[in-house]
Amino acid sequence: MSTSKALDGFRPSRIRGSGANSTGNSEYRIASGYNANIFTGDIVKNVAGYINVITTTTDIAVGVFQGCNYTVDGEPKFSKYWPSGTSASDIKALVVDGPSPTFIVQADASCSVGDINSYNFDVTLGAGSTVTGKSGFGVKAATRTTGSAMVRPIGVFEVPGNDIDVAAERAYPVLEVRLVQTQDAYVSTDLS
């Protein structure tokens, strides 16, 4: 599994401090005609009240996109990804945005046990697939830092062939991560 790179975005895993993820989503708006694809597993941000896919590693995340629904010519559509430039109404993005979700995601290069709960990482901004609707995002292994970055690995996904202690299997490890650079971490308000 982790001996070949096949980045496919962020998949909900669980709620930290809890069991399996309830896959709870919140609805957000996407602007009609928004001119970028958003794939299931892409990290998304808020721009003037609408969901957009992140475009830089310094963007502040809302959460992870899980699909959308909208109406075109009176017909409801449900999609694993937002097709760039679609003109529609009643557009709703489903986003995992809670304060403590974790995600399963592959790294684009080798990581070690020393990276777990020790470093933050940026993410790759890979293109997804309009066939499967899956993201092309992953953890950018070369960006490990003790400073600010998008995600922090908190564990290794326990499946056969993904043993981070075995050199051949840690080439592209599948990690459990939490989002660090989220809007909840940067909330400020003037209460006066």
Image (tube, helix red, strand yellow):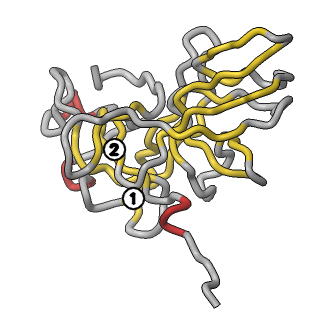
Q: Is residue 139 above or below residue 56?
A: above
Q: Residue at x 30, y 33 (%)?
A: 174
Give the left or right position of residue 11, taking residue 19 as reference.
right
Expressed as whole percent of the image width and height from the top left, the position of residue 45 reads 64, 49
Q: Residues within 10 Å of mark 2 (few under 14, many from 20)?
A: many
Amino acid at dot 2: Thr
Measured in 3D between alpha carbons, the distance from the residue under mark 1 to the one under mark 2, in whole angstroms, is 14 Å
Expressed as whole percent of the image width and height from the top left, the position of residue 40 reads 54, 26
Where is mark 2, residue-wise? 102
Q: Residue at x 41, y 36 (%)?
A: 24
Q: Is residue 73 above or below residue 108?
A: above
Q: Nearer the viewer, mark 1 or mark 2?
A: 2
Sequence-first tag of 1 and 2: 2
Expressed as whole percent of the image width and height from the top left, the position of residue 28 reads 64, 41
Q: Is residue 121 above or below residue 70?
A: below
Q: Residue at x 47, y 25 (%)?
A: 8
Can you tell which mark lies on residue 120? 1
Which of 62 and 171 lies nearest the eye of the viewer? Answer: 62
Which of 14 and 7 lies nearest the eye of the viewer? Answer: 14
